[in-house]
Amino acid sequence: MLKLVVLISGGGSNLRALLEAAEDPEYPARVVAIGADRDADGLVLGEEFGIPAFSVPYTAYESREAWGDALIDEVRRWEPDLVILSGLMRLVPPAVVEAFSPFLLNTHPAYLPEFPGAHGVRDALAAGATQTGASLIVVDTSVDGGPIVAQERVPVLPGDTEASLHDRIKPVERRLLIEAVHDIATSHLDLKELTAR
């Protein structure tokens, strides 16, 4: 059984999908803790699903590096096999990447390397793209430039707003995440091999 720690900044919609998938006894992974960099709405999912939740508030530390060190200590307490950044709206410092990579994944609402960064959906619309997508990557020290684990195209429809497009990308992100975690847990996907290419 693969042990997961999921880190969030917001409502945790991908996290909820993962928690619901893990309720199936056949699903080979379990979320052992939920963490956030602020008082995130998604922390209540811990209570709902009976999973420990913690917060390492970014603003409580004098530097990104100090915050990163505290985050590493907290995550390590749970001895996860895999750490998932799911809507964590903050670049983790290199020490976090070093501590957990390649077992550190991030979901992103674009077809990387197109539209990296915090506003992938907005940027796709601003560029007049006819299609965008969802990606799951191994986190490295770049901005959304790590090795791609899975990705899928999502069309941009006439009249799409940032909200409507994001609403269509999210279910794809969730499915990619749930399938990839399953494949990692069942040894159908080897992150060490993927990152060695």
Image (tube, rainbow, N blue to C red):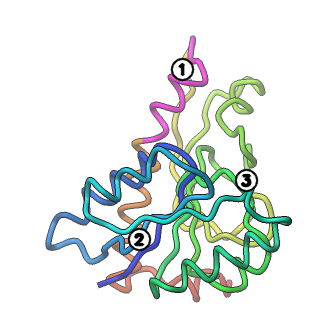
The reply to whether the C-beta atoms of the residues labelled 3 and 1 are less than 8 Å apart is no
Mark 2 vs 3, N-terminal side: 2
Task: Find the distance from the CA under tag 3 to the CA under tag 1.
Answer: 21 Å
Residue type, mark 3 in image: Pro
Circle 3 is placed at which residue position?
113
Residue drawn at point x = 41 percent, y = 79 percent: 184
Residue type, mark 2 in image: Ala
- Residue 121 on image: x %, y %: 64, 34
189 is within the stretch colored magenta: no
Q: Main secondary structure of the magenta part?
A: helix
Mark 2 vs 1, N-terminal side: 2
Q: Point out the image quarter for the C terminus.
A: bottom right
- The quadrant where residue 46 appears: bottom left
**What range of the chain is rendered magenta?**
159-170
Q: Is residue 197 left or right of residue 34?
A: right
Task: Find the distance from the CA under tag 2 to the CA under tag 1.
Answer: 37 Å
Circle 2 is placed at which residue position?
33
SS of the residue under disc 2 = strand
Above or below — where is 132 with respect to 33? above
Res 191 label: none
In front of the other: 31 or 105? 31
167 is within the stretch colored magenta: yes
Furthest toward the left, the residue is 25
Q: Local crowd at mark 2 within 10 Å, few (<14), some, or many (≥20)?
A: many
Q: Point out the image quarter for the N terminus.
A: bottom left
Residue type, mark 1 in image: Leu
Residue drawn at point x = 71 percent, y = 38 percent: 119
Res 157 label: 1
Mark 3 vs 1, N-terminal side: 3
- Residue 84 on image: x %, y %: 52, 67
